[in-house]
Image (tube, rainbow, N blue to C red):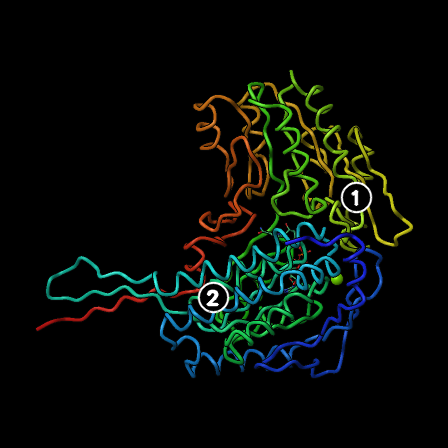
């Protein structure tokens, strides 16, 4: 396939006509209140679409539709091969609409078109296809018990599942949740971020086209109120969330306050990337360290935002890193050559600016910190590198921007202690040529994913994804994700 040029994509922008209506019970509808909100495009900050601002009444309607479809068994009651076939069709439709969806995602979230085309959209399709394949393969157990008892351990769908997702990988994070939830037979309400609702809405339509019955997959855009109402709703059985720790706490509280719905949280991170002096390839490590923080403009829960470098090689490593950072100068995300796009919106930029100011006050700026391309109207921050001390704000807090804190250490023990000195525990990496050091370090790092001599590998669906400590609970991806969306049932049949 010949990929499109910058000019081709720019020409297509005028043809993109996003539909901001919610999807409830198989119908595209505006919010009951008639309220809408303006969804903007980070490339230039202009309004892209008016989107339904769903609130309590819309959440109620969606929950009722989901509950009805669940009780009627139109989805959970299908034979597994039928459910699988529909999900495979759904995955194929996402792939068929790859360019349309990639353009929409790029316009809505400012992600480079090269990434939405290669990662976000095909990644979402792959996720749906992967879980489709589990439907007729993952079974229950027959327990090895008393011979006079037939002991069955089966998995059943939980019922109505709400998926509340952020804006940094709008469709991919959504797919990591709705795909296993649907595969397990649940009825789903997806709540995309107010900053990036468009691909979720379009994909909801494709789910219908694929044959997922009305009411089984609902998409509710909104600004905060919809998410809150889902978390509080007494008839939502499970809420699966990816987003900030602050909102994660509110969701747990809402669940406790209402019906003790299952709560699964994928939260923030401040992931350490440790370069030991016996790192096998410093150039590769520097290139990877740059990608680990600048990919997706650093708006990554797994961003390698703390670079821990052995003091003996620190200067050499920073020089290599600064050189590699040149490849990440921000640009228009519709240009296929662009690797790093704009910051999502002024609100996020304000947050990042606060950290830049703190960094300038207490740490040593080594690169960037300034913006470019102001004439476009978006916010394009240059790759930014600070040398910091462990107590500095930029070395502790999740920034969610292209801002790296470099810390020095003298011994492996010190590196591990620094790495683990965080309330988060999402990911960590270590670079060493010594197999023993690699294994020993990997064991001691308190994180849901540990990379050795690489970073951000893990597109493969077999790896569970999630965090230790305040990075959350439960896991997305892999067969383990099905645990989130199923109840286990023990059935004991006494024989005469
Ligand atoms: P956010 O502000 O927490 O929002 C996430 C979602 O929650 C949005 O859909 C939001 O809706 C909704 N929401 C807001 N208030 C709510 C409430 N009171 N109850 C229920 N839902 C509510 O996070 P974000 O700024 O979009 O995303 C950035 C964060 O996500 C970062 O902290 C990042 O680390 C984390 N993240 C984690 C992972 C992971 O897998 N661990 C992956 C990606 C991102 P509105 O948009 O309508 O407010
Ligand atoms: Mg947007």
| Residue 149 sits above or below residue 119 on the image | below
> Which residue is at the front of the view, 112 or 305?
112
CB atoms of marks 1 and 2 within 8 Å: no
Disc ID at residue 88? 2
Locate residue 236, reporting x and y percent: 51, 73
Q: Residue most toward the front? A: 2
> Which quarter of the figure is the C terminus placed in?
bottom left
Q: Position of residue 140 (x, y in %)?
A: 29, 62
Of labels 1 and 2, earlier in sequence is: 2
At x 58%, y 56%, the residue is: 122
Residue at image point 44% right, 49% down: 462
The residue singled out by tag 1 in the image is 330
Q: Is residue 260 visible to us here?
A: no
Q: Is residue 371 above or below residue 493?
A: above
Task: Answer above or below: position of 267 versus 279.
Answer: below
Residue 150 in sight in this render: yes
On the rendered structure, is 241 left or right of 479? right
Quadrant placement of the N terminus: bottom right
Residue at the location (75% across, 31% down)? Answer: 386
Quadrant of ligand 2 in image: bottom right
Q: Nearer the viewer, mark 1 or mark 2?
A: 2
Residue neighbourhood size for the residue with mark 1, other residues' Cα within 10 Å, grouped as few (<14), some (14–19), many (≥20): many
Label 1 element class:
loop
Q: Is residue 11 left or right of residue 1?
A: right
Cα–Cα gap, marks 1 and 2: 37 Å
201 versus 263 height, above or below: below
Q: How many marks?
A: 2
Q: Position of residue 396 (x, y in %)?
A: 67, 38
Give the image location of residue 255, x and y in percent: 54, 66
For mark 2, give the secondary structure: helix
């Amino acid at each position: 396939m010949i990929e499109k040029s910058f000019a081709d994509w720019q020409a297509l922008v005028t043809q993109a006509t996003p539909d901001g209506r919610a999807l409830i019970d198989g119908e595209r509808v505006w919010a009951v209140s008639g309220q809408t909100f303006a969804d903007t495009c980070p490339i230039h900050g202009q309004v892209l679409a008016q989107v339904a601002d769903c609130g309590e009444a819309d959440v109620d309607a969606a929950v009722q539709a989901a509950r009805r479809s669940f009780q009627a068994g139109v989805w959970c009651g299908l034979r597994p091969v039928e459910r699988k076939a529909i999900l495979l069709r759904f995955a194929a439709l996402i792939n068929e609409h790859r360019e349309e969806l990639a353009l929409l995602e790029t316009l809505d979230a400012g992600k480079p078109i090269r990434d939405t085309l290669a990662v976000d959209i095909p990644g979402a399709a792959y996720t749906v296809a992967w879980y489709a394949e589990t439907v007729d393969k993952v079974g229950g157990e027959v327990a090895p018990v008393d011979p006079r008892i037939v002991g069955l351990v089966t998995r059943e769908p939980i019922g109505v599942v709400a998926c509340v997702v952020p804006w940094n990988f709008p469709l991919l994070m959504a797919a990591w949740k709705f795909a296993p939830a649907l595969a397990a037979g649940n009825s789903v309400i997806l709540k995309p971020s107010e900053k990036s609702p468009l691909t979720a809405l379009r994909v909801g339509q494709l789910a219908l086209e694929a044959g997922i019955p009305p009411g089984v997959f609902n998409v509710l855009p909104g600004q905060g109120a919809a998410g809150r109402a889902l978390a509080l709703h007494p008839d939502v059985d499970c809420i699966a969330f990816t987003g900030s720790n602050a909102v994660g706490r509110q969701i747990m509280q809402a669940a406790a306050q209402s019906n003790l719905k299952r709560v699964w949280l994928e939260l923030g991170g401040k992931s350490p990337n440790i370069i030991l002096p016996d790192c096998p390839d410093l150039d590769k490590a520097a290139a990877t360290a740059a990608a680990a923080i600048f990919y997706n403009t650093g708006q990554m829960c797994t961003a390698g935002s703390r670079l821990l470098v052995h003091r003996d090689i620190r200067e050499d490593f920073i020089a290599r890193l600064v050189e590699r950072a040149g490849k990440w100068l921000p640009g228009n995300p519709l240009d296929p050559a662009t690797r790093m796009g704009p910051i999502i919106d002024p609100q996020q930029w304000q947050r990042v600016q606060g950290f830049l100011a703190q960094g300038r006050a207490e740490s040593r700026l080594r690169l960037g910190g300034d913006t470019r391309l102001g004439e476009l109207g978006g916010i394009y921050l240059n790759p930014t590198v600070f040398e910091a001390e462990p107590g500095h704000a930029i070395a502790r807090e999740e920034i969610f921007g292209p801002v790296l804190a470099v810390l020095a250490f003298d011994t492996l023990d010190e590196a591990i202690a620094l790495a683990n000195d965080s309330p988060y525990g999402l990911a960590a990496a270590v670079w060493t040529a010594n197999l023993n050091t690699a294994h020993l370090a990997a064991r001691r790092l308190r994180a849901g994913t540990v990379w050795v001599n690489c970073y951000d590998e893990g597109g493969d669906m077999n790896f569970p994804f999630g965090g230790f400590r305040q990075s959350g609970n439960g896991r997305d991806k892999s067969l383990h994700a099905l645990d989130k969306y199923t109840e286990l049932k023990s059935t004991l049949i006494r024989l005469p």
